[in-house]
Image (spheres, rainbow, N blue to C red):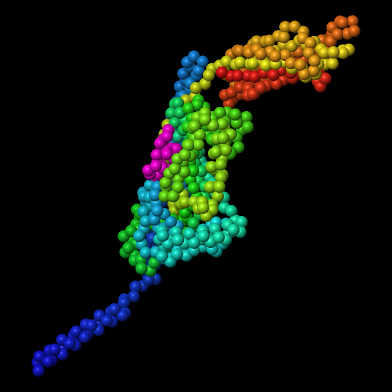
């Protein structure tokens, strides 16, 4: 009997335990999600960090960049007919970025709405993800004509699910807005710089060598020297942006499952929470131009601006075309996941200026500069905002570098004036009939036309009629200093003689010592004006007119 009673007791205890377990499974303890969210919001809002110190923001006076001269020295060497002036200038360059260019593989890390840490990894171009459960996100694709079809909500945000939603929006645009006539040409930014160090060059062209790796990084390892100048031009062509909707409060980006403890374990004052606000899709193209000419860096930069289609001083086009033809130009494109392709555009003295202009401008503004289904672009840049207050995360960088600029110029030029031919356009209608007798002289003057350098004389009176020519075929050679404002003039002087009925000669007043001149000046651009091609000067009126053809060669 006692054994039966004990068995009953054990059975009751077991049943009670099973009942308690069953109740616990059916009725879990509820987490106060509202309090948890409020605690997360309070924790993030009370984080104490200095964003400028954290991301090294530079004092640039509100400008994108600031360059200060630390030291400046120069030296001059004269040898024979040349003078070389070398200038060494040490600079401190400061620059802040609102966007981070994608110059290394970031697949799976960079996507609109991704949470990242505002720390050194962001400075290095490799944002560190924040692995906390996420709430649904909403983003938009800003292609024209997209409207509501460009806005998407992703319930379980991750790189793959966000990309799938982007692809869906693009597919709608390709099948609808594009068919309706919407065209989205790239919004292009352009930066140009001469290379003295890899970091300096990358900052000047609005990229950053610290973000780059592998083959992209090596593109910044071409430097100018005393005998070679390297210029890089960068075009960032944006097709469209994917823009994450700004969260109304920090805790809104997390799911209800995200606990305060987990947030505290990942996020703190030294790892401030941030999010990728926007990702820009398009292409980055870089042109690297190398020249061994004696032109200044500013002239070589201006020559590429001209090649790219920017307006320049018309008087300097000849100089810029000369620089282009004497330089080598390579195209560097950055594709998906920061893959690099390099293609030569022109080698020194192998292409005409027009060919180079057509190639460069065709690359910049050709069909690949327009978004299409077959040319969708790749992620090229992204912006980051702090989760605490939705403020922009600026990134600052600084470097010191020394620019060595040596320019060698001739002290004087040997000038050759080839006197080609004398032309009688109208023979002054010699009285009473017949052709006229002409005597002409060509003088070359310098020092503002008051000093004779050399001259050619026809030597005798020669009878000419309309359209007759006298082949001169003589070259006059002289030397002049290369000083701005220095001039030389090629001057034609002509006399014409008619005869009366008694055979007595008299000078025709319409061609009695008349002159025609071509003046050539040494300009501030370092060249003599008006020396290209065959030159022509003439004097007289419609019935009594002569001219001179000549060419000028500068050595």
User: Looking at the rendering, in which quadrant would you find the N terminus?
Assistant: bottom left
The magenta stretch spans residue 211: yes
Please determine whether, in this image, residue 265 is positioned above or below residue 396.
Answer: below
Where, by quadrant of the figure, is residue 302 drawn? top right
State the image coordinates of residue 536 (x, y, percent, origin top left).
70, 21
In the image, taking residue 267 as reference, residue 4 lies left or right, namely left
Q: Quadrant of residue 161?
A: bottom left
Q: What is the quadrant of the C terminus in the image?
A: top right
Residue lying at the far right in this picture: please name it.
Answer: 501
Q: Is residue 231 above or below residue 279?
A: above
**Looking at the image, can residue 205 be seen?**
no
Which residue is at a point 55% across and 50% down the rendered structure image? 370
Query: Where does the image place residue 209, in percent across and percent down from the top left?
Result: 41, 42
Q: Which residues are magenta?
A: 197-223
Q: Position of residue 276 (x, y in %)?
A: 44, 55
* Towards the viewer: 424 or 320: 424
Question: Residue 288: horizontal and vertical position, in percent?
Answer: 47, 36
């Amino acid at each position: 009997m006692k054994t039966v009673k004990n068995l009953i007791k054990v059975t009751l205890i077991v049943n009670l335990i099973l009942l308690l377990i069953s109740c616990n499974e059916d009725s879990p303890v509820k987490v106060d999600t509202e309090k948890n969210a409020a605690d997360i919001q309070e924790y993030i809002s009370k984080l104490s960090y200095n964003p400028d110190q954290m991301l090294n923001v530079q004092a640039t006076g509100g400008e994108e960049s600031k360059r200060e001269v630390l030291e400046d020295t120069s030296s001059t060497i004269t040898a024979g007919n040349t003078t070389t002036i070398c200038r060494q200038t040490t600079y401190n360059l400061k620059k802040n970025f609102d966007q981070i260019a994608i110059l290394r593989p970031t697949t799976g890390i960079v996507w609109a709405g991704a949470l990242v840490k505002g720390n050194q990894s962001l400075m290095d171009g490799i944002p560190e993800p924040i692995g906390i459960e996420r709430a649904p996100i909403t983003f938009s694709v800003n292609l024209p004509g997209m409207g509501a079809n460009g806005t998407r909500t992703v319930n379980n945000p991750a790189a793959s699910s966000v990309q799938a939603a982007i692809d869906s929006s693009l597919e709608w645009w390709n099948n609808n807005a594009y068919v309706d006539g919407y065209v989205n040409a790239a919004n292009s930014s352009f930066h140009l710089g001469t290379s003295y160090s890899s970091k300096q060059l990358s900052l000047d062209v609005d990229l950053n060598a610290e973000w780059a790796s592998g083959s992209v990084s090596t593109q910044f390892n071409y430097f100018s020297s005393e005998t070679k100048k390297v210029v890089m031009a960068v075009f960032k062509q944006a097709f469209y942006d994917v823009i994450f909707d700004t969260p109304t409060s920090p805790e809104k980006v997390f799911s209800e499952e995200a606990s305060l403890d987990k947030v505290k374990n990942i996020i703190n004052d030294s790892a401030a929470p941030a999010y990728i606000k926007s990702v820009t899709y398009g292409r980055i193209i870089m042109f690297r131009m190398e020249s061994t000419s004696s032109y200044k860096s500013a002239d070589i930069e201006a020559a590429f601006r001209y090649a790219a289609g920017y307006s320049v001083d018309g008087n300097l086009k000849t100089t810029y075309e000369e620089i282009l033809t004497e330089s080598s130009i390579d195209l560097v494109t950055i594709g998906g996941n920061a893959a690099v392709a390099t293609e030569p555009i022109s080698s020194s003295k192998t292409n005409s200026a027009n060919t180079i202009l057509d190639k460069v401008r065709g690359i910049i503004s050709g069909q690949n500069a327009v978004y299409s289904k077959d040319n969708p672009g790749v992620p090229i840049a992204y912006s980051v905002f702090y989760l605490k207050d939705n403020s922009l995360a600026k990134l600052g960088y600084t470097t010191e570098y020394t620019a060595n600029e040596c320019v060698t110029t001739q002290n004087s030029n040997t000038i050759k004036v080839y006197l080609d031919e004398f032309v009688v356009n109208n023979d002054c209608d010699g009285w009473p009939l017949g052709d006229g007798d002409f005597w002409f002289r060509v003088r070359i003057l310098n020092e503002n036309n008051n000093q004779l350098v050399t001259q050619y004389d026809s030597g005798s009176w020669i009878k000419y009629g309309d359209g007759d020519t006298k082949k001169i075929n003589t070259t006059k050679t002289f030397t002049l200093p290369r000083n701005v404002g220095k001039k030389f003039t090629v001057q034609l002087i002509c006399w014409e003689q008619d005869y009366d009925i008694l055979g007595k000669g008299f000078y025709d007043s319409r061609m009695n010592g008349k002159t025609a001149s071509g003046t050539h000046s040494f300009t501030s651009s370092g060249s003599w004006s008006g020396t290209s091609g065959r030159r022509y000067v003439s004097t007289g009126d419609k019935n009594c007119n002569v001219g001179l053809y000549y060419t000028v060669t500068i050595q």
